[in-house]
Amino acid sequence: MAQAQRAKPGANHIETATDPAAFAHWPEGLYGAMKTEEFNGVVGSTLVSETDQVRVWHLRLPPGKRCPFHRHVNPYFWSAHRAGKARGYFSSGEIKDVEHYEGETRHFFYGEGEYMLHSVENIGDTELLFTTVEFLDGPNTPLEVPDSVRLQVPGATAA
């Protein structure tokens, strides 16, 4: 069995292009969305669990839908629950198409001041479903997330 290797700081950092021309090939309106959402800490559809050390997210993307741009600032990993096709839009201006497989898992690490700002679009014909686990004890202050993305437990009352 292969042993996982810890990525070094900088390995997953993606620079944000400062020249709007780097985004000229993007669909209309996406560059503006990226600028509006550049400090969005909502990295999934629903925050299903949270402790002082981790946040656990579910991300559901039906065919043809795109999640908002969001910023990753601390170590995390995601696992795909279904196979499917996705297109990533990155703050560098890059667009990357990928085919995910069931069980695929990727790990990311960011050093102090590093991040990845991106959005994911489902370009396949099956719903994409991911679980993402963020580690909050990384080198950067975790980004705030609104209560509206936290799982609403049926029948639960506010404390």
Image (cartoon, rainbow, N blue to C red):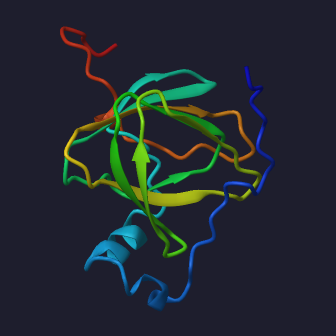
Q: Nearer the viewer, residue 147 or 20?
A: 20
* Image position of 103 (left or right of 150): right
* Vertical arrangement, residue 20 with respect to residue 68, above or below: below
**Where residue 100 sits in the image (x, y, percent)?**
42, 42
User: In the rendered view of the protein, which quadrant contains the N terminus?
Assistant: top right
**Where residue 104 sits in the image (x, y, percent)?**
50, 33
* Vertical arrangement, residue 41 with respect to residue 137, above or below: below
Asked which quadrant contains residue 2, the reply is top right
Please name the residue shown 33% across and 55% down the image. 68
Please name the residue shown 49% across and 72% down the image. 94
Asked which quadrant contains residue 159, the reply is top left
Q: Nearer the viewer, residue 17 or 83?
A: 83
Q: Nearer the viewer, residue 97 or 67?
A: 97
* Vertical arrangement, residue 48 with respect to residue 46, above or below: above
Please name the residue shown 60% across and 37% down the image. 76
**Where residue 18 sits in the image (x, y, percent)?**
56, 84
